[in-house]
Image (cartoon, rainbow, N blue to C red):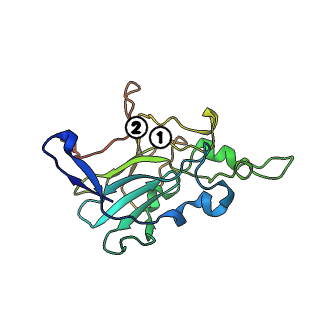
Amino acid sequence: MFAYRAGATPAASALVLQTTFDISRYYERCQRYPAVCPEDGNWKDGGHDLYPVPGTRKLFVTTGERVFTFDLDANRAGGAAVLEPYAPMFAIDSTVSRALEKKSSKTGRSRAGELRVVLKKGGVKSISQVPGSRIVLAQAAPWFASGSELSYHYDRNTLLVATRASDRPDVDLSDALKIQLPKSTWFYKARVLDWQTPATE
């Protein structure tokens, strides 16, 4: 984690490392297929986003695979981190994930097993919660292996939505639990800082 140190000019300002937390045990692919670690051209599943959970001492933490929360008071600096799965977006299903899950009639193995990848990856680029509400929004663009047919483009125009612990948004299997922006709108990361409820007549 870093602290911002303001300088006399923007160029003189800097982020200063304060402490680190080890989250390596939460990389499922590394645990399941140790031979593929460290990261290579087909695997970029490390820590991706870190954002405050409003009104708490917790942070959202996303990796290329999963979404967690991190309790600042329950973790010691420099040690192995303890992360809690964020249930609505911990495992995000998709068309590509389901295709990789199917077993080959010849080998009996799934395509995921052959490629040594984890299913229901979220690839969550950004996540934020609307202050004063339970509305959580995320941009998910999972990648499973090199090749366009096994990855979603990192710039997208859809936000996944969760408001309850039981919500399970997916990438592209349905229109449920999504905010669809115009096709001309593409983004890599998106933060929702405020939410205005439409007035009713």
Residue 167 makes an appearance in the image: no
Residue beneath the point at 23% across and 63% down: 55
Residue, far right: 106
Residue 40 makes an appearance in the image: yes
Secondary structure of the residue carrying numbered label 2: loop
Residue under numbered circle 2: 188
Q: In the rendered structure, which amino acid carries the disc numbered 1?
A: Asp
Q: In the rendering, which numbered label is found on residue 86?
A: none
Q: In the rendered structure, which amino acid carries the disc numbered 2?
A: Tyr
Residue beneath the point at 44% across and 67% down: 83
Residue, far left: 8
Q: How far apart are marks 2 and 1 (CA)?
A: 20 Å
In the depicted structure, whether residue 136 falls above or below residue 56:
above
Please report whichever mark, 2 or 1, sits nearer to the chain's N-terminal start.
1
**Label 1 environment density (alpha carbons within 10 Å; few <14, some 14–19, many ≥20):** few
Q: Residue 59 sits in which quadrant?
A: bottom left
Which sits in the foreground, 83 or 37? Answer: 37
Residue beneath the point at 47% across and 64% down: 23
Q: In the rendering, which numbered label is found on residue 175?
A: 1
Which sits in the foreground, 151 or 46? Answer: 46
Quadrant of the drawing holding the C terminus:
top left
